[in-house]
Image (tube, rainbow, N blue to C red):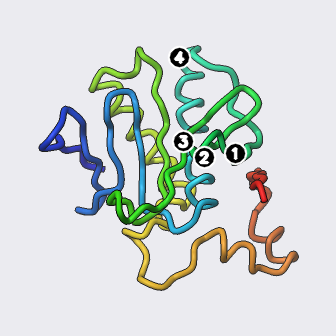
Amino acid sequence: MRIRPETTSSGWRLFEDGKEVGYIRGSEVGFAGFTSQMDAAQAAYAAHRALARRRAKSSWTPSPPEEFLVGERGEAQYVIERSGLLARLYEPKPDAGRADWGFAVTLRPEESLNVFAMSRARIMWSALRASGYAQRMRQFTATGLESGADQYARQPKEEKHASSGGAPSLVAAVPA
């Protein structure tokens, strides 16, 4: 991942293979390009888990959450777990320049300095790549492919369990 300064503000833009995938603005690290709310929520969860593991090495946080929910407060949507908010979800808004789903994780004040924020962004991006969520981003898929969440939902039950390989599953509840 390459990190380049924004031209209009003091933030940073995140690129992978020449394609913009996210940003760092103040104490917020965000990634965008997901085709569905669930893909963005699962990617936010994976990024937060990686950040929590990194913080645990520095004795900053307890163990990462085991499950999450997608909830709303007012017009905003969040990925939450028992201890609080993990990330804010951003839905597509073409009139505001956002064509895809995305999420933003707020860093702690001590992580807001550029060198730490960049490090945390790299940790989260590595988690998205390792978990396969980066490949679900519009920037890395052919036009017309369905989201990873949609593909997963269509699989027969036997394949769902066989393909998980014993890995822990993500539990999500989406309000109706």
Name the residue type under label 4. Ser
User: Which callout, 2 or 3, points at the residue further toward the start of the chain?
Assistant: 2
Question: What amino acid type should be assigned to the residue bearing mark 1?
Answer: Gly
* Whole-number angstrom distance, CA of label 3 to CA of label 1: 10 Å
Of the two numbered discs 3 and 4 on the same chain, state the one appearing first in sequence: 4
Disc on the earlier residue, 2 or 4 = 4
Q: Is residue 151 left or right of residue 48?
A: right
Q: Going 68% across and 28% down the picture, which residue do you hit?
A: 84
Asked whether the beta carbons under mark 2 and mark 4 sit within 8 Å of each other, the answer is: no
Q: CA distance from mark 1 to mark 2?
A: 6 Å
Classify residue 97 by image quadrant.
bottom left
- Answer few, some or many: residues within 10 Å of disc 1's Cα (few below 14, many 20 plus, some between 14 and 19): some
Would residue 169 be visible to someone looking at this image? no
* Residue on which the image places disc 1: 71
The answer to whether marks 3 and 1 mark residues whose Cβ atoms lie closer than 8 Å is no
- How far apart are the alpha carbons under marks 3 and 4? 24 Å
Residue occupied by mark 3: 88
Q: Position of residue 161 (x, y in %)?
A: 83, 68
Mark 1 touching mark 2, by CB under 8 A? yes
Q: Looking at the image, do the residues carrying marks 1 and 4 touch, with CB atoms under 8 Å apart?
A: no
- Residue named by callout 2: 77
The spot of residue 86 in percent (x, y) is 60, 35
